[in-house]
Structure formats: structure tokens, C-alpha cells
Image (cartoon, rainbow, N blue to C red):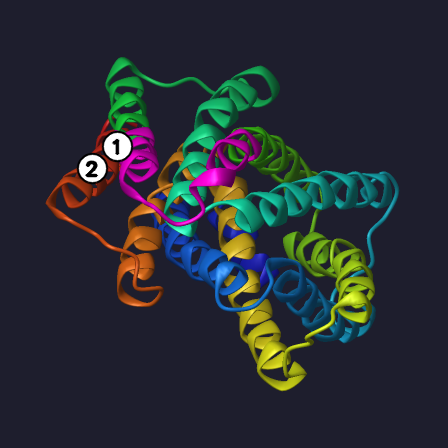
Amino acid sequence: MSSWIQGLEGTEAGEIAALFLALLAAFLHAVFGALQKGRFDPWLSRGAIDACLFVFSLPIALFVVPWPEGWAWLILLGALVIHFAYKLGMALAYERGAFTVVYPVVRGTGPLFTVVGAWLIFGESFSGLQWLGVAVLLLGIFGLAAYNLIHIQIGRDTLVPALWLAVGTGALVALYTTYDAFGIRYTPDPFTFLAWFFLITAIDFPIIAALRWRNLINRPDPRPLLWRGAVGALVAYGSFGSVMLATRLDKVGEAAVLRETSTVFAALIGWLVLKETVGPRRLALMTLIALGAVIVELGG
């Protein structure tokens, strides 16, 4: 598998693979966000997901892939710090705001900063048509967030702090996307980076969740929580793994923008699964998001 991925680098087939990987990451990331925001406390949900990620990743990291070498260890430790801050921001935002309000703001802020970061670090540039696509996509994402802010009545007393947290967390999305792209490009075997990334970045939230669990008066049944954690871990492999492979095969900025079509999937999940209302205006805004992603891809 590693040699196949390496063989795709710099080829037209690699660009096509990166497109499908980014769109797969978009769908799976929306599912991942809904799993964390669902009926359980978001801190417990994320803790259960990370605990399962650690258990699943340990044998792969130790016995299947080559071990990291040299600076790769420091890069992985840096990923631990950045992703901990990101997960902390997501949990705080989900604790205070509705999924369909918080998620679009986080995902809308991320690609704009990522495009700038990819330009500074990797020397990537966008054409005028691609920048138009970014503008259309961001208009749809932030329009969706604004519409939700006006009309959603759940948790309005904490909605403004939730939005500020979402903006800050979106900046962290840009930071980790650019940083992870550097890490997976630096490591000769991409699956070495992925396996150790999932192992190392999963050590923090299970501890936080255990402490929170111990202090709860009404503790939920742990069995469905662990089931959610196992499913969430598998989804995380697909979501984060796909977008990191996409950034190795093609432009970081394009992968980041395409991944943010996850907002469309998130709105559909919020409507179909979480029973949050979706009307014609929100459908039109979701169409803008998809249209912006298409323009970015066609303009490349």
C-alpha cells in the first residue's frame, strides 16, 4: 500500500485520488462531528473515541509499519499539542452551541487560513477562478452559520461564546491541516506517520473523559458510549487519514477546501439524524458550498 501511494505522487492519477480522498474525508468528518456532538456529553464521546483509537492503533504502530526516525518523533509530539488544542476547542464549542451552528463556522474558518498557510510553507498558489470558488464556498458556510444563529432557539444563551470558540478552533484546523501535511510528507512511509499519529494524539482525552466521568452524578451507560467510541475511531481513520493522504498526493490548499464540503453533509446529518430543522434557505446555502468546491477543483 505504501509503495502504491508513493507511486501516485506527482501524477495525474494521484491528483484524482486526492480529489476522492478529500471528498471521502468531508463525508466522514461530518459523521465524526455528529458522533461527538450526539446524545452523550462531547467530552465523554471524544474520550471514548480516542481510547478506541489508542487500542486499535497500538498493534499497528508497534508491529505493522516501520517506526518513525529522526525528527519524525518531534513532529508527532507537535501534532499531539496542536490536536489537543483543537479537540479542546471542539468540545468547548459543542458544549455551548448547536451542531449545525458550530460546525459550519469551524469548517469555514479552516480552509481560508489553510490556503494562506499552504502558500507560505509549501509555495502553493491558487488561480483567480479558484479564489472565486473559495469565496463562494465561504459565503455558503458563513451564510449557513449566520442563518442558524438567527433562527435556532436551542442554547441561545451560550451561542455567542460557542461561535467565538468555533472561530478559534477553525484557526486550529488550518494549523493542524498544514502541520500534518508537512509531517506526512516528511515521513518516507505515509502509513508510519498515520499509525503513530493516531496512537500519540489519542492519549490525552481518555484521561480527561475518565476524570469527568468520575465527577458525574448521573453517569450514562458506558456500553453505548464505548460502541460510539469504536465506530468513531474507525470513522476517524477514514476522515483524518484520507485528508492527510490527499495532502501528500496533491495541493494542501485544494484538499482543505474540498474537505469543507463536510458542512453540507453535517447539515444533512443534523436534519436527518439529530432532528435539527433544515429549510429551503439552508439548502440553497449548502448548494453554494458545493458549488464553491466544484469551482476550486475545476480552476486547478
- Image-quadrant location for residue 49: bottom right
Judge whether residue 60 can be spotted in this image: yes
The stretch drawn in magenta includes residue 50:
no
Judge whether 63 appears above or below 46 on screen: below
User: Looking at the rendering, in which quadrant would you find the N terminus?
Assistant: bottom right
Q: CA distance from mark 1 to mark 2?
A: 5 Å
**Residue 22, position as x, y percentages in the image:** 41, 48
Q: Earlier in the sequence, mark 1 or mark 2?
A: 1
Residue at horizontal 24%, vertical 32%? 292
Q: Residue furthest right?
A: 70
Check disc 1: other Cα within 10 Å, few if <14, some if 14-19, many if 20+: many
Element class at badge 1: helix
Could you tell me if the residues under marks 1 and 2 are in contact, i.e. CB atoms within 8 Å?
A: yes
Report the front residue among 222 and 46.
222
**Residue 155, position as x, y percentages in the image:** 45, 47
User: Looking at the rendering, in which quadrant would you find the C terminus?
Assistant: top left
Q: Amino acid at mark 1?
A: Gly
Check disc 2: other Cα within 10 Å, few if <14, some if 14-19, many if 20+: many
- Image-quadrant location for residue 289: top left
Residue at horizontal 55%, vertical 53%? 240
**Residue 285 — which label?**
2
Judge whether residue 253 can be spotted in this image: no
- Horizontal arrangement in the rendering, residue 98 relative to residue 165 (left or right): left
- Image-quadrant location for residue 284: top left
The stretch drawn in magenta includes residue 156:
yes
- Horizontal arrangement in the rendering, residue 193 relative to residue 269 (left or right): right
Judge whether 25 appears above or below 118 on screen: below
Report the front residue among 241 and 282.
282
Residue at horizontal 56%, vertical 56%? 241
Residue receiving disc 1: 140
Q: Amino acid at mark 2?
A: Leu
Q: Which residues are magenta?
A: 140-165
